[in-house]
Amino acid sequence: MDEQGWHELRTQGTLKAAKHLVDQDFLSGYEWMRIQMNKHIGSVTPGNPYPLWAWYQAKFEKDRSEVLLSDFELWHFVLNQSFLAKSMYKFNQFEKRLYRGFGTSNFSKLPLAVQNEIKESWEKIFDLNFHAKDIDSPRANKQIQATFWELNMNEVIQVDRFTAR
């Protein structure tokens, strides 16, 4: 949550995300997460088509059924539209297969069946016990992110201003 989001939450009592706030380079990743949230925690609330993200800047209390947890590190496979393999060896094998068969690993230039195979691999971001030593961190060291449709002021326990190091 940034300063603008915190202001909106304080003044309006509810914080919702909007498509115009989504970086267009990552829109396909956000679209994929929307589909996953519909599948895992239920459909979007009216007038709120995009998820909100929370890591550690805001402490809040929401019903578990309203939150979808995922691995922040692995989320970047979705944003980069890359195959999320169970090992670096399998990742490299998949990339070689793409170049041999299609001359590219550019997601948008791949056949739909291959795009779907890549999207299916992204499901691993929700398995917080998934670990491939050369790809991500073990459970104890994971950075867990939470996505949800909206945040109400009465759910907020504490907000800390984030300072980058």
Image (spheres, rainbow, N blue to C red):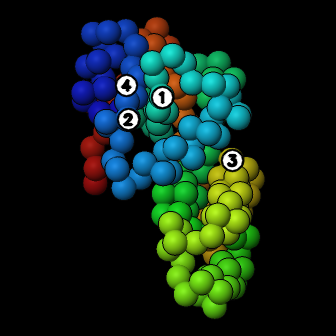
Whole-number angstrom distance, CA of label 2 to CA of label 4: 24 Å
Secondary structure beneath label 1: loop
Secondary structure beneath label 3: helix
Q: Residues within 10 Å of mark 1 (few under 14, many from 20)?
A: some
Q: Residues within 10 Å of mark 4 (few under 14, many from 20)?
A: few
Lower position in the chain sequence, tag 3 or tag 2: 2
* Residue at (52, 25) in percent of width and height: 149
Lower position in the chain sequence, tag 3 or tag 1: 1
Q: Does residue 5 appear left or right of residue 153 in this picture? A: left
Q: Residues within 10 Å of mark 2 (few under 14, many from 20)?
A: some
Q: Residues within 10 Å of mark 3 (few under 14, many from 20)?
A: some
Secondary structure beneath label 2: helix
Query: Which of the 4 image quarters holds residue 145?
Result: top right
> Which residue, given by chain and number where applicable, does mark 4 sit on?
159
Closer to the camera in the image, 27 or 74: 27
Return the mark for residue 111: none
Lower position in the chain sequence, tag 3 or tag 4: 3
**Dividing the image into 4 quarters, which one contains the C terminus?**
bottom left
Whole-number angstrom distance, CA of label 4 to CA of label 1: 24 Å
Secondary structure beneath label 4: strand
Image coords of residue 65 (percent x, y): 69, 23
Q: Which of the two marks, 2 or 4, is nearer to us in this view?
A: 2
Closer to the camera in the image, 109 or 164: 109
Whole-number angstrom distance, CA of label 3 to CA of label 4: 25 Å
Tag 2–tag 4 contact (CB < 8 Å): no
> Which residue, given by chain and number where applicable, does mark 1 sit on?
49
Q: Which of the two marks, 3 or 1, is nearer to us in this view?
A: 1
Whole-number angstrom distance, CA of label 3 to CA of label 1: 21 Å
> Which residue, given by chain and number where applicable, does mark 3 sit on?
126
Closer to the camera in the image, 3 or 109: 109
Image coords of residue 110 (percent x, y): 58, 72
